[in-house]
Amino acid sequence: MNLEKQAYAPICEALERFKRKRVVPFDVPGHKRGRGNPELTRLLGAECVGLDVNSMKPLDNLCNPVSVIAQAEELTADAFGAAHAFLMVGGTTSAVQAMVLSVCKSGDKIILPRNVHKSVLNALILCGAVPVYVNLRIHPVIGVALGMEVEALEEAIKANPDAKAVLINNPTYYGICSNLKALTELAHRHGLKVLCDEAHGTQLYFGENLPMSGMAAGVDMAAISMHKSGGSLTQSSVLLIGPNMNQGHVRQIINLTQTTSASYLLLSSLDLSRRNLALRGKECFREVVRMAEYAREEINSIGGYYAYGKELVDGQSVYDFDVTKLCIYTKSIGLTGIEVYDLLRDEYDIQIEFGDIGNIMAYISIGDRIRDIERLVGALEDIKRLYQSDAGELAYVDSVLPEVACSPQQSFYARKETLPIRKTAGRVCGEFVMCYPPGIPILAPGELITDEIIDHILYAREKGCSLQGAADPVVDHLQVLV
């Protein structure tokens, strides 16, 4: 990485030059630097609204960058160690879908774990590719799916020698990392492209003593949520490619779905965040690790809770663990993760990232402070004292592995009927059902519905999980194939 070059922020510098010229706007957006919407200007500030501008020659164009955006992408590639980088303004959802659409077409097989984000399965609906799921072990205590084992991938490849690609989470939402380098080398030996969902992995590229990043492992494509742990604005992400991908083809794929009206607020935030991490990333993430480990130690000292970490590593299904992820198992105090999540928000004014059936996650990033960690620890201690009950038998979000009956695209567009959820066992699902966050489907189009899955959905709803994806917003009914 060239640190001297990384000090530049070409998009931001172009915006500064543009602002000084006081150009009269006869283009979009129609608020005309905020003058046409004073309420919006008061909410966001004149500086912010004034930089919400349209693509023009001095500011380049994201669909076909040739100047400042192209320079920012080159700097991003250098910072992340990639052959090329694409700035994305449709979130990591658009980056993940661009990865899949770049390597798969209708009928192609793609090998992946079942605990992928919904954006992956949505991409399969769009292109018609067929998922081949690698079975993952479930941790016997915390109930989350673990990493992809090398032997399991090898079995999947042998059973599906015509597969085109493999997709790997690095890390998972819960901090679990697979042996990414060994998986990548295995896939490449068999001629498969390797796609890496690193929505939660920005820190792997800039921190020290953290799990291996996708580009370091030699993957072909990696989707990075800069807005999650990298400090950029929500919805801004990066798509990285290795030397064996055709840059022009990937740009064409991105332009199939990405907006032609890219937000310069998002682009400039990516530009500045890349510069910040390139110049100060090691220092920033060293502090993130320190805070997360401190929080883990303090929460475990309360008793009842289990803030898990490196002790999960076994060299196989948990090859490594991202210690910046503060995930806490709550079952032992008799509360689901979503119940603790709601209590923290409603009673203690603490908003954490998510709560599922068995766990909560507090996202620790470059903007956190120790005093906020201490407030979280104190609230968890209080919740245990006030609300602890018998642990009982709680279901786990990731323990459900549905059987695939037909492709996501085929089932999504098939003729369907709507039935009460209790009457759908044995039928093929025609829609998604998921708790969001984390956005890992409990059911996806084309999967067989079972009584166990129905029980799981209704239990999650009863405990307060936000169920999404189904046409019926309260999921009293499901759409099934006729």
Image (cartoon, grey):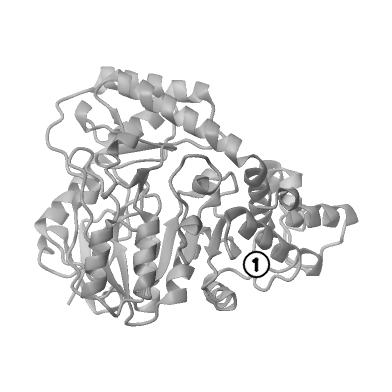
Residue annotated with mark 1: 261
The spot of residue 402 in percent (x, y) is: 18, 61
Foreground of the two, 266 or 271: 271
Label 1: which secondary element: loop
Tell me: 252 left or right of 152.
Answer: right
Quadrant in the rendering for residue 175: top left
Residue drawn at x 77%, y 58% is 32
Foreground of the two, 338 or 16: 16
Would residue 443 be seen by someone viewing this image from the given angle? no
Give, as a three-letter code, the residue at label 1.
Ser
Against 365, residue 482 (above or below) is below
The spot of residue 146 in percent (x, y) is: 27, 49
Would residue 341 be seen by someone viewing this image from the given angle? yes
Q: Give the residue at the far bottom of this rendering.
A: 106
Quadrant in the rendering for residue 307: top left
Task: Give the total number of marks visible in the rendering.
Answer: 1
Residue drawn at x 66%, y 42% is 43
Against 246, residue 272 (above or below) is above
Residue drawn at x 17%, y 41% is 140
